[in-house]
Image (spheres, rainbow, N blue to C red):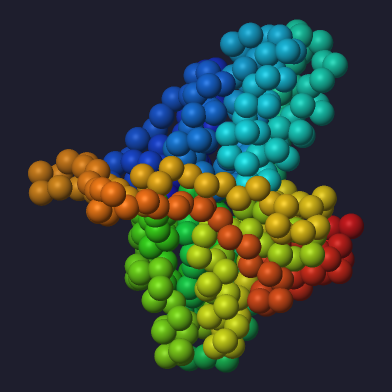
């Protein structure tokens, strides 16, 4: 997708260096950062310079390549893979990408390992682009159905950033929106600011603006009243981990949006590539829910009057804060899952009908 009219992907490899868009600096600064070591890749994931499940997976794949360039040694490669998996525990794509890379690399001759690693990482990246594009064409059909019944603009609510900045290109939740916009369907997006890191306000609104799609940032608790007023035609969110029974683990606050949507008969869809499906865990209570630094809640960052980035404390200094990063939306609140292979009900039968 585009930034200031120029096409970008979120990550690419050039001259033994991984290039990323530093998303901690958006929307106020656009900075391309170099990752030159495996520790750089791990840190980029931990600090959320890269974020979004598919992009985290791609970064992990490239992190293994950087490990090979640093030290072409199997024990070092295995240690790097373990450190990458531990960097963010909830996003299933991270482990999926590492497992896929290691399956290709174990037993490979040291003279060939870098070449094979590069080929597999490129395959992961290109696969994600194609998956997200297909998610868009499949989700477009849903938007078209709504547009055929309603005159005027289609109002879509989304939570967090499941846009192209969270993937390699296109995004998951945003891909149907981009496809609808390109087809001439009038869409408007309600963008949850998504505290505490404001990924909706900082990233989703930013990328929608760059593509010329009308959008309005709202406080996280506004969605319910908009649905009551009939101002939301559908919800589309992404997912960091989808269980085989259709339960979805996504950014904290997603569950509450699904409850409000159910109560107001608003369709609630989840967009996902198959790489985010966890076929092993059967009970959502077994999902490791990441708890991040409470400073993300107690402080906010923005531009001051001199156009300089500043971080300020907004809570009483003695107050404690809990910062859970994700929650789980049970399948019964989900209208459907939009995947690269089609749309299915949020259930084991629905998912297996597409992927097994």
- Direction from residue 286 to residue 179 in the image, left or right: left
Residue situated in front as seen by the camera: 78 or 109: 78
Q: Is residue 115 above or below residue 94?
A: above
Q: Is residue 228 above or below residue 259?
A: below
Please, which residue is most extreme toward the left here?
306
| One can see residue 276 in this view | yes
Please, which residue is most extreme toward the right here?
356
Q: Quadrant of residue 356?
A: bottom right
Residue 67: where, in percent of width, then height? Answer: 62, 17
Q: How many marks?
A: 0
Q: Quadrant of residue 102?
A: top right
Residue 84: where, in percent of width, then height? Answer: 62, 30
Residue situated in front as seen by the camera: 189 or 221: 221
Please, which residue is most extreme toward the front here?
318
| One can see residue 21 in this view | no
Residue situated in front as seen by the camera: 131 or 68: 68
Q: Quadrant of residue 209?
A: bottom left
Residue 269: where, in percent of width, then height? Answer: 62, 72
- Direction from residue 105 to residue 337 in the image, left or right: left
Residue 133: where, in percent of width, then height? Answer: 63, 56
Instruction: Name which residue lies at 40% across and 58% down.
Output: 195
Instruction: Name which residue lies at 32% across and 52% down.
Output: 319
Instruction: Name which residue lies at 35% across and 70% down.
Output: 218
- Direction from residue 251 to residue 301 in the image, left or right: left
Residue situated in front as seen by the camera: 213 or 302: 302
Instruction: Name which residue lies at 61% across and 13% down.
Output: 69
């Amino acid at each position: 997708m585009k930034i200031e009219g120029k096409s970008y992907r979120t990550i690419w490899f050039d001259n033994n260096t991984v290039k990323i868009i530093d998303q901690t600096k958006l929307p106020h600064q656009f900075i391309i950062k170099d990752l030159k070591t495996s520790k750089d890749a791990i840190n980029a994931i931990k600090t959320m310079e890269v974020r979004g499940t598919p992009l985290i997976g791609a970064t992990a794949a490239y992190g293994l390549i950087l490990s090979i360039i640093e030290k072409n040694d199997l024990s070092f490669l295995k240690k790097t893979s373990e450190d990458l998996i531990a960097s963010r525990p909830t996003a299933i794509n991270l482990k999926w990408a590492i497992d896929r890379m290691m399956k290709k690399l174990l037993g490979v001759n040291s003279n060939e390992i870098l070449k094979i690693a590069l080929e597999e990482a490129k395959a992961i990246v290109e696969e994600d682009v194609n998956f997200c594009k297909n998610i868009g064409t499949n989700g477009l059909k849903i938007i078209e159905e709504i547009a055929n019944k309603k005159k005027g603009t289609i109002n879509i609510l989304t939570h967090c950033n499941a846009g192209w900045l969270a993937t390699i290109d296109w995004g998951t939740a945003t891909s149907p929106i981009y496809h609808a916009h390109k087809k001439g369907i009038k869409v408007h997006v309600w963008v949850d600011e998504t505290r505490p890191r404001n990924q909706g306000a900082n990233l989703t609104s930013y990328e929608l603006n760059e593509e010329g799609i009308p959008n309005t940032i709202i406080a996280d608790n506004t969605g319910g009243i908009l649905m009551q007023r009939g101002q939301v035609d559908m919800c589309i969110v992404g997912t960091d981990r989808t269980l085989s029974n259709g339960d979805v683990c996504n950014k904290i606050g997603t569950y509450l949006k699904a409850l409000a949507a159910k109560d107001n008969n608003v369709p609630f869809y989840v967009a996902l590539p198959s790489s985010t499906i966890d076929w092993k865990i059967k009970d959502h209570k077994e999902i490791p829910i990441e708890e991040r630094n409470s400073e993300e809640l107690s402080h906010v960052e923005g531009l001051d009057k001199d156009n300089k980035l500043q971080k300020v404390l907004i809570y009483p200094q003695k107050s404690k804060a809990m910062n859970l990063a994700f929650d789980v939306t049970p399948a019964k609140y989900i209208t459907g899952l939009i995947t690269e292979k089609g749309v299915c009900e949020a259930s084991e039968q629905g998912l297996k009908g597409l992927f097994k």
